[in-house]
Amino acid sequence: MSNQFDYKCPQCGCAGDLEIAASVWVCLTADGTDADMSENGDHVWDDNSEAACQACGWSGKVLALASQHKGGGPFSVLLLYPSRDDTGGPETYYQHYTAADAAEAVEQARAQASEHGEYDPDDFDLLAVFDGHINMAYNTTIPTSE
Ligand SMILES: [Zn+2]
């Protein structure tokens, strides 16, 4: 069984037992609430809504379902710091991210890197994006002359 959104459980891969906690309008009645009586029949959920898989017990956010669907996953991003006169050489920024796609991972990296100084996220040049969380076997940081 599948679902209209083509979402699959990140843990067991099933698509037929997924549930999302959506907000619904309910009509206040004498003995409680009634969702069928409310005039506004909408129900609302987004990437941050809680989701769960009844088949395996997984629970998380809708974002986990959506990003998997979009082919998202783990990325490693390598950025170049904006050139500065006082560092004596180029400096790189390397971090792991989980994102919907490579562009989103780069966006996250630039936002995070820019917090390490007075930079604009767009000041960072992108050197490389890798599929997966790849650990550096050898840190080739260029020694600065201090
Ligand atoms: Zn599952």
Image: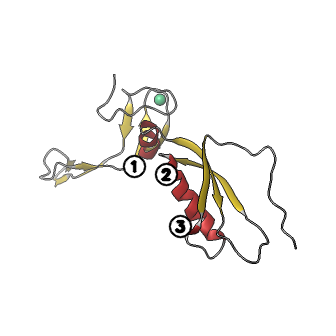
Instruction: Classify mark 1: helix, strand or loop.
Output: loop
Judged left or right of residue 15, residue 111 is right
> Residue furthest toward the top?
1
Q: Which amino acid does label 2 sit on?
A: Ala
Q: Name the residue under label 1.
A: 49
Judged left or right of residue 78, residue 3 is left
Q: Name the residue under label 3.
A: 122
Q: Which amino acid does label 3 sit on?
A: Asp
Q: Where is residue 53 in the image (x, y as percent from the top left)?
A: 44, 33
Q: Name the residue under label 2.
A: 103
In the rendered image, which quarter is residue 91 located in?
Answer: bottom right
Q: Position of residue 105 (x, y in %)?
A: 54, 52
Query: Are there few (<14), some (14-19), or many (20+) residues within 10 Å of tag 1?
Result: some
Query: For the residues marked 2 and 1, what is the alpha-carbon distance in whole angstroms?
Result: 23 Å
Could you say which is closer to the camera, residue 8 or residue 83? 83
Query: For the residues marked 2 and 3, what is the alpha-carbon distance in whole angstroms?
Result: 13 Å
Q: What residue type is labelled 1?
A: Ser
Pick whichever of labels 2 and 1 is earlier in the sequence. Answer: 1
